Amino acid sequence: MTIIVYLKRNSERPNLAGSRRSAPTATDPDRSVVVFHSGHSGSYSITLPARPRSSWYGFWFVNYLKGDAMHIEKVGVMTPGDMGQAVAMQIKARGFTVCTALEKRSERSRALAREAGLTDVGAVARLVAECDVVLSVMNPGAALDFAREAADALRASGRQTLIVDCNAIAPDTVHEIAGVIQGAGGRFLDASIIGPPPRGKAKTHLYVSGPAAADLEQLAGPQLLVHVISERIADASALKMCYGALNKGTQGLWLEVLVAAKRLGVDGLLDQQLRESHQADLYNWALGQFPIMPPKAYRWVPEMLEISKTLATAGITPKVFQGTAEIYRFVAGTSIGKETPENRDKARDGKDVVRLLAEERSRS
């Protein structure tokens, strides 16, 4: 059998003529694609969508010939919150059918799903039964409960749906979830999302680990960058835990100290000293992060506890991030913590956040 591989420009949707397997269903007009020609039993061509990483072509082609490549058409996303909705929109823009399950969900989730044009299948059982892959993007404190619900759906449907946990959870929690899903007959991958919600010009990174993790590269796009890092379950989450510890842990430390300085009446002097020191850039960074943080604080509490769990497993004290969880628990209980990313006061700056939290602490 002779195989010729070449690149061309094509504005058509991907197709696969005369073959038992179909190519991925999403591509952009006038993007480079790969075309394979075979002289075995006649010739046919496979048009594949462009991907950010050239290694994807080799993976898909080899596994196409072996019959092992997973073909994704319908993607489920639970839940369509701030990050989940943005990720879902990026996947939908690539031409995939994107579904969610809004039974028992809040009106905010329903509104975000409608805005994104997601297909509501109602119950999680239907989501698992009808989709090729389901991405769990939610409060990390709910990740295990969702996995158990998905496992019930897997057993009931007899499907081998790929369940991908994309939450900020500890490697030990990942392994527990993997056992739940695989024990019910499903496939499991570990993933972590690092970066802002991919809206506007923002890009986010989806790191994936586990057996055949490259299957998920089909979802990649210009703003959703998929990185396959290993075949080992939990490597992606270990990376997320370390990154989140530095990112959100640093924010928590700055917030705690600046609120304390405000209550002690030395905030002006501290501001002056910081701006005259080598800490000025980090100080400005922290103030820039504070305005968007309060509505997310309730989700950061379980994330800090998962980081604490991760560090304990690595032989490092878990106490630092147990304390950081307390800071975010306080923020979540305040009036600004009860806002949503959509209805927060966009004119509020970092110093306003510090002032309001200091006032709320005085009243508590």
Image (cartoon, rainbow, N blue to C red):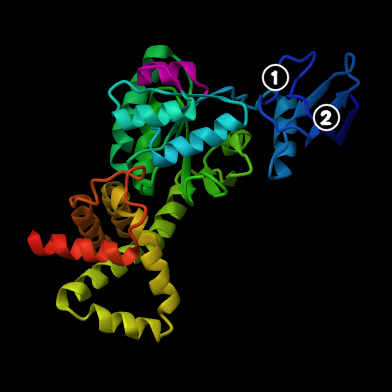
Which of the numbered marks, if any, corresponds to residue 244?
none
Lower position in the chain sequence, tag 1 or tag 2: 1
Q: Residue 164 location in percent, x, y?
A: 46, 34
Q: Residue 277 location in percent, x, y?
A: 40, 85
For the C terminus, which image quadrant? bottom left
Q: Residue 23 location in percent, x, y?
A: 70, 24
- The residue wearing badge 1 is 22
Instruction: Determine which quarter of the picture holds residue 166.
Output: top left
Residue at the image position 40 percent from the left and 16 percent from the top: 126
Residue at the image position 45 percent from the left and 35 percent from the top: 85
Magenta region: 119-132
In the image, 272 versus 2, the foreground residue is 272
Local secondary structure at mark 2? strand
In the image, 243 versus 271, the foreground residue is 271
Local secondary structure at mark 1? loop
User: Do we see residue 315 in this rendering?
Assistant: no
Residue at the image position 20 percent from the left and 73 percent from the top: 262
Q: Does the segment drawn in magenta span residue 130?
A: yes
For the N terminus, which image quadrant? top right
36 sits left or right of 309 in the view: right
- The residue wearing badge 2 is 35
